[in-house]
Image: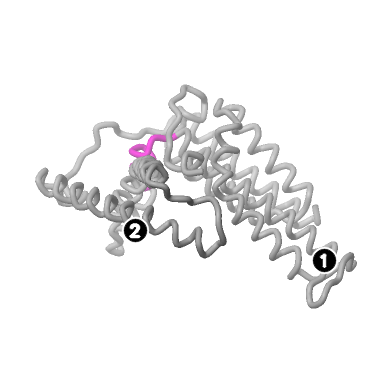
């Protein structure tokens, strides 16, 4: 299960999406998320799904890699669907048991919420799969630069995000090693009651947290020894520059969002 967590991984490539400026991809992802929350019907969700599939095809990322990233979140998706299924009222009542009931509106809302979460996660994964953590950090810092005027620590925020993305695969690998070591000592993480399985995770979580804090301390010492003092006076090895394709892509994404809003206003 730990190996299925692919957030923060980068898949090298030379596709059209790979070549886009990270600022363009960030803005397009924000526009896509906004359109996803605006959509309210099968038509708009279908258009968004078609756009997502087209983006995946253009990026040349294998769909299996995206589906693999959804596996660790299956429990959250199912739990969200169940909550909406039983607690949303409206429409025709299909099943009733005690204080619980299933209605047509509940089924519709549950389906929409499941699709929304899955498409939201897939779109976010597509951003990280096609953009290196360093480029993503630089793009985010440049976008948030105006906030420096109100003394927001933009560089520090971007640096924290970069470090977090960089160490997600490392911590997953460390957790996998600790899990295998504990299993070799007779630990059982897969059988027993829920409380017993939760207690069995303690021998895994304690050394993982110790390892994470040790790595964080080593990184802090390394940064201090190299005289790191935040973004003051720092330059970039690779300067970002937006091309005509970036402006066209941003314009197309805004037109797409406008089209979704218009369809929703007309009841589609």
Q: Nearer the viewer, residue 30 or 254?
A: 30
Residue 218 x/y as whole percent: 18, 48
Q: Using residue 7 as the reference point, say whether residue 114 is left or right of it.
A: right
Label at residue 102: 1
Q: In this view, does 240 lie to the left or right of 30?
A: left
Q: Which of 241 and 224 is in front in this view?
A: 224
Above or below 130: residue 76 = below
Coloration mode: one colour
- For disc 2, the neighbor class at 10 Å (few under 14, some 14 to 19, many from 20) is few
**Residue that numbered label 2 is attached to:** 147
Q: In which quarter of the image is residue 19?
A: top left
Q: Residue at x 42, y 45 (%)?
A: 183
Q: Can I make out residue 109 in this image?
A: yes
Q: Tell me what residue is drawn at x 68 percent, y 56 percent.
A: 113
Mark 2, secondary structure of its residue: helix
**Residue 134 shown in magenta:** yes
Looking at the picture, tell me which residue is in the foreground, 58 or 170: 170
Q: Distance between the residues labelled 1 and 2?
A: 47 Å
Which residues are the magenta region? 131-140
* Marks 1 and 2, the one that precedes in the sequence: 1
Q: Which of marks 1 and 2 is in front?
A: 1
Counting from the top left corner in percent of width and height, residue 111 is at 74, 54
In the structure shown, which secondary structural element does the residue marked by tag 1 occupy?
strand
């Amino acid at each position: 299960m730990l190996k299925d967590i692919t957030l923060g991984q980068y898949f090298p490539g030379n596709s059209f999406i790979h070549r886009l400026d990270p600022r363009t991809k960030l803005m397009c992802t924000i526009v896509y998320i906004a359109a996803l929350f605006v959509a309210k019907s099968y038509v708009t969700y279908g258009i968004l799904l078609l756009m997502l599939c087209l983006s995946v095809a253009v990026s040349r990322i294998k769909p299996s890699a995206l589906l693999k990233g959804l596996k660790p979140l299956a429990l959250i998706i199912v739990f969200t669907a169940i909550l909406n299924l039983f607690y949303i009222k409206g429409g025709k009542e299909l099943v009733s048991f005690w204080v619980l009931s299933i209605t047509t509106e509940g089924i519709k809302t549950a389906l929409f919420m499941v699709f929304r979460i899955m498409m939201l996660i897939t779109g976010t994964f597509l951003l990280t799969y096609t953009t290196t953590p360093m480029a993503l950090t630089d793009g985010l810092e440049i976008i948030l630069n105006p906030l420096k005027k109100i003394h927001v620590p933009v560089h520090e925020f971007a640096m924290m995000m970069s470090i977090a993305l960089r160490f997600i695969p490392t911590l997953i690998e460390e957790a996998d090693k600790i899990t295998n070591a504990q299993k070799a000592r007779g630990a059982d993480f897969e059988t027993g009651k829920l409380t017993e399985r939760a207690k069995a995770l303690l021998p895994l979580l304690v050394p993982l947290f110790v390892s994470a804090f040790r790595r964080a301390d080593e990184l802090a010492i390394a940064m201090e020894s190299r005289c790191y003092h935040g973004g003051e006076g720092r330059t970039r090895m690779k300067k970002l520059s937006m091309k005509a394709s970036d402006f066209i892509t941003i314009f197309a994404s805004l037109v797409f969002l406008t089209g979704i809003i218009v369809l929703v206003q007309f009841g589609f």
